[in-house]
């Protein structure tokens, strides 16, 4: 029996133990954006490192130093670099993933504890924070290595790994780590890498596997408003003083309109209009507005026209309001005037936008809008983190190999998509290594990444693992 057939059989036979390993990963609350959870992120890094070592991967934990977050100096979680195989006659593939997750509280609206994997047998869903973003796909790679080790099969390619624990919070210091490792040449972990594969996004719908050749960048901001020396009683101070929250709401309402148009002069204008060929691509995609409404969980698509909806995600920038730090948000009715509020928003970027050319536009606009309020409060616009957009060439053996792997496992031709989310290190890999980067998503559009009740379908975990392994065989055979 051919090695790849044995591999596929092993994945089916061992599905339950793979799900158990995913449950262990979900249990570690590796939330990178919460200072109180930093030790858990580090524990998750150590757990992942132990798994890799036990599967025969040579690893190195790179200390990325410290950073200041939420008023504290914190250790950054380590980057895990790994190596498996040194055969000069084989191609070398670099795999990237992130072991941190977004915050999750049961009270956000989860039906179950977000950090206890629940296997919903009826629907075949694996529910828990990180199942689809990005612990499930990382476990997929572990499953592939385990299968080869247990079956005594030779890997068809050499593997290199780069796993980080800060992706959901700006990937701090990772670019520097990658660039320095590349600078080590033959001595470095990335020596001889022929292409990169990242599994950290989603199919466009719930039916068709996808290959992804673009990501939006991001620029994340906080508008901080201060004035009172402490929180105030609204009965004693209401109408007597300028209130930070009132100023903030005015400013936040002037960033974007209800149809998603960005109101900051120069931002939307930077993006060139679509060409007729590009519009044709969107028209031909297997997509309807029902898909976005199914994934969003409500009949709220911004347009009935599928091309408009697809372009909004794949080739337009967008501005989203995320939350207000310092605002009263608990149950009940507290009659408080908060003394200090921070309005969080981010802008997803498409070429030629970058954080560098967007930040000055945002700051100048907010300063001029704040001046119009004639408020005696103080405003400070803080840029928190960001990353540049990325677009790849799909006419490359890396994409061809992934297409054949999907056809072999799913018996379907993949959609070619540009993703609306961001993975800051992607462009750095492409530029620093000078190789093709491919995004090979495992999960579906309705997985609820970053949301409540995040899930990965059992079939996507198991068939997705088969796709990852089969892709390696196809890469080895690609011309
Ligand atoms: N799966 C990729 C992903 O979710 N990336 C995040 C990255 C990010 C940037 N700032 C906060 N998170 C995304 O939101 O796109
Ligand atoms: Zn992710
Ligand atoms: Zn994410």
Image: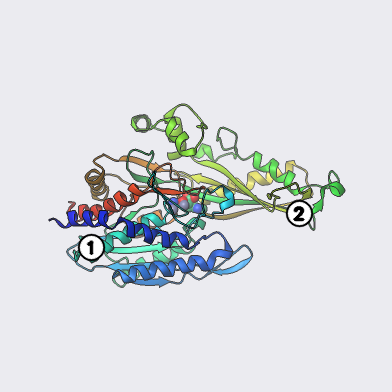
Figure check: 405 above or below 184: above
Q: Which mark is residue 94?
A: none
- Asked if ligand 1 lies within 8 A of label 2, the reply is no
* 244 is higher (above) or lower (below) than 72: above
Toward which corner of the image does residue 320 lie, by quadrant? top right
Helix, strand or loop for disc 1? helix
Residue 8 point in image, percent of width and height:
22, 54
The residue beneath circle 2 is 339
Q: Position of residue 104 (x, y in %)?
A: 54, 54
**Residue behind mark 1:** 148
Looking at the rendering, which quadrant does residue 141 occupy?
bottom left
In this view, 376 is above or below 144: above
Q: Earlier in the sequence, mark 2 or mark 1?
A: 1
Q: Examine the rendering and report whether any part of residue 166 can be seen.
A: yes
Q: Which quarter of the figure is the N terminus placed in?
A: bottom left
- x 25%, y 56%: residue: 13
Q: Can you tell which quarter of the image residue 424 is in?
A: bottom left
Left or right of 248 on screen, residue 240 = right
> Left or right of 224: which side holds 303?
left
Q: Viewer-proximal residue, 189 or 353?
A: 189
User: Secondary structure beneath disc 2?
Assistant: loop
Label 2 – label 1 distance at C-alpha: 59 Å
Q: Is residue 23 above or below residue 39?
A: above
148 left or right of 182? left
């Amino acid at each position: 029996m051919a090695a790849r057939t044995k591999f596929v059989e092993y994945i089916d036979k061992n599905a339950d133990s793979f799900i158990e390993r995913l449950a262990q990963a979900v249990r570690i609350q590796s939330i990178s954006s919460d200072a109180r959870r930093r030790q858990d992120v580090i524990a998750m890094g150590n757990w992942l490192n132990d798994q890799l070592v036990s599967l025969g991967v040579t690893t190195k934990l790179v200390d990325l130093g410290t950073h200041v977050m939420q008023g504290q100096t914190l250790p950054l979680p380590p980057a895990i670099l790994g190596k498996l195989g040194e055969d000069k006659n084989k191609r070398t593939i670099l795999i990237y993933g992130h072991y941190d997750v977004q915050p999750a509280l049961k009270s956000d609206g989860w039906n179950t504890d977000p950090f206890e994997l629940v296997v919903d047998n009826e629907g075949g869903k694996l529910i828990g924070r990180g199942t689809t973003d990005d612990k499930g796909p990382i476990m997929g790679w572990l499953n592939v290595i385990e299968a080869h080790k247990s079956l005594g099969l030779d890997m068809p390619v050499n593997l290199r790994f780069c796993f980080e624990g800060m992706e959901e919070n700006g990937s701090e210091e990772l670019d520097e780590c990658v660039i320095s490792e590349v600078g080590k040449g033959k001595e470095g972990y990335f020596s001889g890498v022929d292409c990169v594969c990242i599994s950290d996004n989603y199919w466009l719908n719930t039916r068709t596997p996808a290959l992804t050749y673009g990501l939006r960048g991001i620029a994340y901001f906080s508008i901080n408003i201060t004035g009172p020396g402490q929180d105030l009683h609204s009965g004693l101070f209401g109408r007597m003083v300028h209130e930070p929250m009132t100023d903030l709401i005015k400013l936040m309402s002037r960033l974007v309109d209800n149809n998603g148009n960005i109101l900051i002069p120069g931002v939307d204008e930077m993006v060139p209009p679509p060409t007729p060929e590009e519009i044709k691509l969107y028209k031909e995609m297997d997509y309807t507005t029902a898909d976005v409404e199914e994934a969003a969980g409500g009949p709220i698509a911004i347009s009935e026209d599928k091309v408009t909806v697809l372009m909004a995600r794949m080739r337009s920038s967008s501005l989203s309001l995320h939350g207000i730090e310092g605002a009263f948000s608990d149950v009940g009715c507290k009659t408080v005037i908060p003394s200090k509020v921070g309005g969080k928003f981010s802008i997803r970027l498409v070429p030629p936008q970058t954080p560098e050319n967007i930040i000055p536009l945002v700051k100048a606009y907010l300063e001029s809008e704040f001046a119009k309020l004639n408020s005696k409060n103080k405003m400070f616009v803080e840029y928190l983190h960001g990353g540049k957009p990325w677009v790849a060439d799909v006419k490359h053996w890396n994409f061809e190999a992934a297409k054949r792997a999907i056809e072999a496992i799913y018996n379907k031709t993949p959609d070619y998509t540009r993703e609306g989310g961001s993975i800051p290190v992607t462009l750095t890999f492409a530029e620093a290594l000078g190789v093709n980067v491919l995004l090979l998503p495992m999960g579906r559009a309705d997985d609820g990444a970053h949301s409540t009740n995040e899930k990965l379908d059992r079939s996507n975990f198991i068939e997705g693992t088969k796709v990852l392994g089969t892709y390696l065989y196809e890469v080895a055979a690609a011309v």
